[in-house]
Image: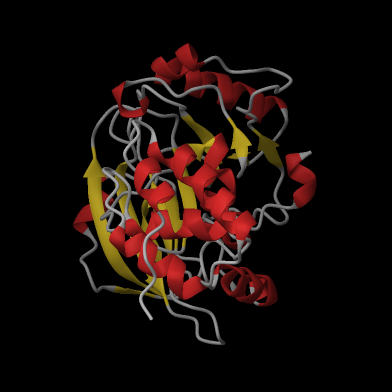
Amino acid sequence: MEQILDARLIEASRVGDPIPALRAAMRSIAEEQPVDERTLHEWSCKLRVSGVHAHLLEYTLRTECGYEPVPGAQRVVDWLRAHGDELADVTPVDVRRASLFHSDWSVGAREPIAAKEYADAAAFTARIWRAMHAAGAEAAVGSYDHERPTYGGALFATTGEPRSVHIGVDIFMHAGTPVFAPLDGVVRSFADNAAKFDYGPCVVLEHDVGGGAPKFFTLYGHLDRDSLREVHVGKRIACGERIGRMGPFPENGDWPPHVHVQLIMDMLDFRGDFNGSCRRSQRDVWLSLCPDANLVTRVPAAVWG
């Protein structure tokens, strides 16, 4: 039986920043009576919220009702945990055994990085490389699920809450370093996201591992442009096969050379691109949509401190 859309959700969908209002409305509705998953799906399809994908809206409403935000995300996490030893290294360095430096960009870091420091890629790179060499490290890494100072540039400009929680894993090495597929996949999309502070060249793989896990995706950002000349949609990439190479700045979005690796459950119609950070208030939804990428990069927990 079709469920009538609750008027509180309609009203919330019309405010200037609808997601917080929709969450509050859904929470109020769920406190009055349980709402089943089918009803949530129907409501999500009926609501028309500008700038918000219908799937993301559904994941948000599910969260407020106590359901897993993205159905199947935990099954993917469980599969990757069970099969971690079968994965290939994303770079030539075996991060499970190598000496690594944690390049901590988080709010509250011991040596914090101000947003304005992002603007000078050469100086920023030199800072990371000095710290890496002082630590005798083969690579530097940036962690998943931490809040960074507000990113600069028009790409991250917003009138509301900024996207400040990093939802991938970064591995810093020299430009030209090869990037490998951690498991078998197919090229889903690729693009050169050329805006400053964007991904630059980026490749997305789709994975179908079976074992009860749904299909999922991995994203590799900040590559060089030659990497995009070597891929096409539908190309099969074997576990351990090269996807591309880390790009130099400014080609890579004007960042210190590194690869940003991200796990994604639903591409939300993005092609060759995806949000690499989220609002802190939406963290619970986005960490389900983008589970911990360290499940494929496999940096030891001790490195993060």
* Residue at 44% in and 35% down: 257
Q: Quadrant of the N terminus?
A: bottom left
* Residue at 52% in and 20% down: 126
Residue 113 lies, in percent from the top left, at 58, 18
Residue 121 lies, in percent from the top left, at 41, 21
Residue 205 lies, in percent from the top left, at 37, 65
Q: Is residue 1 left or right of residue 289?
A: left
* Residue at 31% in and 55% down: 47
**171 vs 228: above or below:** above
Depth check, front residue: 97 or 211? 211
Q: Is residue 40 left or right of residue 271?
A: right
| Observer able to see residue 222 | no
User: Hey, which quadrant is residue 17 in on the image?
Assistant: top left
**161 vs 240: above or below:** above
Q: How is the rendered protein coloured?
A: secondary structure
**Total count of labels:** 0
* Residue at 34% in and 21% down: 153
Q: Quadrant of the C terminus?
A: top right
| Observer able to see residue 111 | yes
Depth check, front residue: 56 or 6? 6
Q: Which residue reaches farthest bottom?
A: 211
Residue 285 lies, in percent from the top left, at 53, 52
**170 vs 48: above or below:** above
Depth check, front residue: 6 or 55? 6
